Amino acid sequence: MSAPAHIAAAASWRSDFPALHQDIHGRPLAYLDSAASAQQPASVIDAIGRYQREDHANVHRGVHTLSHRATEAYEGSRDKIRDFIKAGSRNEVVLTSGTTESINLVAQSFCRPRLQPGDKIVITHLEHHANIVPWQLVCEQTGAELVVAPINELGEVELGRMLDLIDDKTFLVGVAHVSNALGTVCPVSKIIDHAKARGIPVLVDGAQGVPHLDVDVRALGCDFYAFSGHKMFGPTGTGVLWGREELLDAMPPWQGGGDMILEVRFDKTTYNELPYKFEAGTPNISGVVGLGAAIDYLQVIGMQNIEAYEHDLHTYMVSELKKVDDIRLIGEARNMASVQSFLVGDIHSHDLGTILDHQGVAIRTGHHCAMPVMQHFGISGTARASLAFYNNRDDVDRLTIALGKAREIFG
Amino acid sequence: MSEVQDNLQDLYRDLILDHSRNPRHFGRLSDATHTADGINPLCGDKLRLYLRVDEQGRIESSSFEGSGCAISVASASLMTDTVTGLPVNQAESWFEEITQRLTSDAGASGPKTGLDKLRALDGVRAHPARVKCATLAWHALHSALENESTPATTE
C-alpha cells in the first residue's frame, strides 16, 4: 500500500468503530488506549447481538436447534482462531477468559506437576504482571527459581544475557511478543531457536503481539502462545491458549467441571479430549462468537496492512512527540509496535491523563501492570499512547497539542 | 470548551499546584510515634505518613514522604498542614468529613469544612477517577491513628 492509500483505508476502517464517533468533554474522541482495550467494530457488536437474539443456548449439550447453532458458532470461532494464528489443529486452540488465564493454565498444568526444586523459569524484565506472577506462584509451590533477563536503557531485552540464562536447569522460558508498557517487539524467534536447541519449551505472551503483528505460531516455533480477545477488537472475557498438541495432551486438566469430561464415576472420571479437557464449565459463548467476528474483520484488512500502517503512524507519532518540550520517551527499542510511553517534565502521568481527557484524548497512565519496568527506569509510571489501525495523524496531533496544554497548566 | 477549561482549572487550583510543587511537611520524622503507608494500587502512588502524638493525645508534628500525582501530593501536604497541632479525635473527625465530602454525592452541600484551604480539594468531585488520589493521605492518617499494620489503600 502507498501512503495515500493507507490514509484512505484508515478513514474507512475508523468509520467501522461506533465508539470512536463521540465527543468527550466537548471534543471529538481521540482514542489512544487500544493497548489497554481496543474498541470493537460494528460487525463484532452486531454478531454478539444477533447471537443473543437468535441463537443462544448452551453448547456441546442439547439436541435442539438453538444448541446446535450455538455450538456451530462457538466452534466456528475456534476454527477462525486456528486459521488466524496458523495453528496446525483446532485441538491446539484452548479458549480461556484471556491471556492471564492462559498463562496460569500453563503454570499450573504444565509446570507445577513437573517442576523440581532448583529448576528455573526464565522471563524478561519487561513482562506484564500476568507473565510474572503466575510463575512466582508456581515457583513458590515447587521450589523452582524465577530468573529475570535484563533490559537495556532503550527498553530492549539484552538478548545475549538472556540466552546465557537459558541453560540445562531451565524448565521453561516465558517472554512477551510485544511489551505492553514499552512497545518493544522482543526477539522471540532467536530466543525460541536457542531454547528449542536445548529442548526447553517457550511460552510467548502474545497479548500485545496479535493486535499488531501477523502471527504464525508454527513459524515462530514456540510451544505456547497466549492472547486476549479484547486487545484484538473482540470482547473482554475471551482469550486463547495455543499449545503444541503433544504438550497439551500430556497435561492434566486445569479446572474440573462440566464439558471437560467423557465419563464421571465416583471411582474414576475420564477426561475429555483436546481442547475440551481445558474448558470446564459453560464458556463465554457470545464473547467467543464476537471474537470470531473480530478475526473475520482483521482478515479482511490483513494483518500485514495493519502492521505497515501502524508502523508509519508510530514513526509519525515519535517524531511529533520529540517536538514537545521536556518530553522523555520511555521505550525506544529499534523494533517497536505502535505503543509509546513517555513523560513530560516532572508532570505526573495521572495529571497528564486527566488534562488530556479534558481535551478528548484518551491515554493510559500509571505502571501498566509492569511495575518492574517502571523500577528499571526509576519512575512510578508513564503516560502511554497506543495506536491501532483506526487511529490517524489527526489523533497524534491532538495528543501533542494536549500535551502543550498540560505544560501550560503546570508551567 | 470554556466549561471544560473551568473544570480543569477547578481541579488544578493555584493552591493545589503550589502544594504539589512545594509540599509542606515533606520528609521523614525521626521520632514519629505513629506511621502508616498509603498505597493506591491502581496508580502505584505511595506515601508514608509520620505522626508524633504527645501524651495529651495531640498531633505534635506530622510529615510524609513518597511519590504521587499533583493531587495526591497536594492533598498530603494540606492534610499534614491541617492536622498538625490537633487532638487525635479531631483529626479523625477531619478524616471522616473530608472523605465524605469528596466521595459522596451530597458532598457539595454537606458540612462545610470550616477550613478554606481544604476546599481546594473539592475540584476532584468532578473527576471520579481522581478522588482516590485526594483521599489517599487521609486514609493513611486514619490508618496511622488506628495503628493498623497493613498499608492503607483507597480501595
Image (cartoon, rainbow, N blue to C red):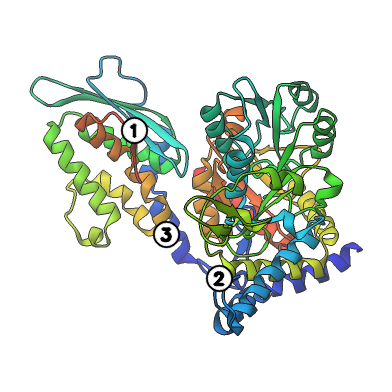
The residue under label 2 is A23
Q: Which residue is mark 3?
A: B7
The image quadrant where one finds the N terminus of chain A is: bottom right
Residue type pointed to by label 1: Pro
Q: In the rendered image, which residue does mark 1 sit on?
A: B151
> Residue A66: x percent and y percent?
59, 82
* Of residues B32 and B147, the one drawn nearer to the viewer in this rendering: B147
Q: Depth check: give the residue in front, A53 or B2.
A: A53
Q: Are marks 1 and 3 in contact (CB under 8 Å)?
A: no
The chain identifier of the residue carrying mark 2 reads: A
Indicate the quadrant where residue A112 lies: top right
Residue at mark 2 shares a chain with residue at mark 3: no
Where's residue B25, x and y in %? 32, 27
Query: Separation of disc 1 and disc 3 at Cα?
Result: 32 Å
Q: CA distance from mark 2 to mark 1?
A: 39 Å
The residue closer to the viewer here, A258 or A23, is A258
The x, y position of residue A7, in whole percent, is 82, 67
Q: What SS does tag 1 mark? A: loop
